[in-house]
Amino acid sequence: MKTSIQIGKIMGIPIKLHITFLLILPVFAWMFARTEPQFGGFQDVEPELLRYSMGMAASVLLFTCVLLHELGHSYVAKKHGSDINSITLFLFGGVSSMEDIPRDPKTELKMAVAGPAVSLLIGSILIMIHEISRQELLFQDSPYMRLVWLIGYINIVLCIFNLIPAFPMDGGRVLRAWLAGRMSYIKATQIAAGIGKMFAIFMGIFGLFSSIIWLTLIAFFIYIGASEEEKSTEVSVILEGVKVKAIMSKEVQTVSPETTVEELVDIMFKYKHMGYPVMDGSKVKGIVTFTDVQKVIKEDRKNVKVSQIMTKELITAREDDDAITVLKLLTRNSIGRIIVKNDEKMIGIISRTDVLRAVQLLE
Ligand SMILES: [Zn+2]
């Protein structure tokens, strides 16, 4: 299922909105409109239309600032040669999806600090504007100036919250970068992730006892984030230097476009693989998997040919590619296997199982 939509590109990076984000936008707008003025809300603003418009403006601006924060990270990452696939705005902020996080602690440190620095800069400027306008008695207590203050304040909170030294927050990366200068990268990640998890547990419990349920919810996401960060770092360190050609399967069982789905099911039982390249002579025409088979009802399997159900748009790898790159391709596209080609010729196939088995063996 497609869970996010692209709204544009900045610095060549696709900017996407996750569906959870589209749901939360009006909720935030409503919240800002209903919050009392001393907390920066617009509860007293009349008429009603202006009140809710201000709420919506605050909501949109809040996420614009989250995006600018993410772009801060991306800018530094790009400057140091890392590729950013996309930035997705989620329920709880933004996530930059990166080709690979630089393993150089100094670069990682700069990158991690860049986001909070952007938030701090925006926050300081807005609060300063608000302060000046207050002293000059301009726009005194107009909803517009309150909006300036509110967004400024939120940016400062965004900066501080992100500097908490817990994965997957930026502070966790700062901590890992600092530790990585003193110990192995894996060890540094484990410690930083451990602190992240502990922090999440305390925050979750605190949320439960103080019945601030959203704290518990955020804590849950922090816990998951910390665990994922730890796992993915471990895997990428283990797979360092491992090439596709070392772990791919060279003997590949293939099927022809003319094979019927019924025959294909028999082949699947016999060879116990879930996916097969479809070959017309020496040419790869596509790939057919168990998922494709499931779309054909039993009665039709005799008549439907593989060419009718196979995936034609192929994602391929080269034998000199890094195993970790292939694992990321598999994950990003949620597929089980990738055909390895040398020029136009297929020379092997590499599956998620191949990569994970290699991880286990090397561990
Ligand atoms: Zn950040």
Image: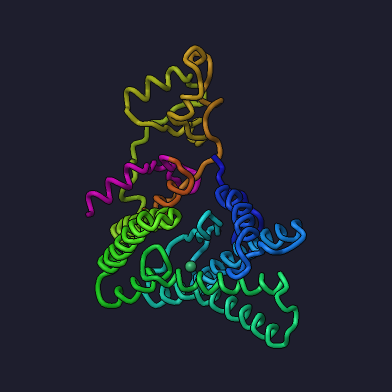
Please tell me which residue is depicted at 66% across the width and 55% down the height of the picture. Answer: 7
For the C terminus, the quadrant is: bottom left
Q: Position of residue 336 (x, y in %)?
A: 41, 40
Q: Is residue 184 above or below residue 277?
A: below
Q: Position of residue 40 (x, y in %)?
A: 61, 69
Q: Is residue 9 above or below residue 126?
A: above
Left or right, 157 with reference to 200: right
Left or right, 50 with reference to 235: right
> Visible in this render: residue 143?
yes
Residue at the outermost bottom position = 136
Q: Position of residue 252 (x, y in %)?
A: 37, 35
Magenta region includes residue 338 = yes
Q: Position of residue 47 (x, y in %)?
A: 77, 59
Please tell me which residue is depicted at 60% across the width and 70% down the height of the picture. Answer: 38
Left or right, 298 with reference to 131: left
For the N terminus, the quadrant is: top right
Nearest to the observer: residue 44 or residue 226: 44
Q: Is residue 349 above or below residue 5?
A: above
In the image, the segment drawn in magenta is 336-363
Please tell me which residue is depicted at 63% across the width and 55% down the height of the picture. Answer: 30
- In this picture the colour scheme is rainbow
Nearest to the observer: residue 4 or residue 164: 164
Nearest to the observer: residue 123 or residue 331: 123
Magenta region includes residue 167 = no
Left or right, 201 with reference to 156: left
Nearest to the observer: residue 87 or residue 351: 87
Q: Is residue 12 above or below residue 262?
A: below
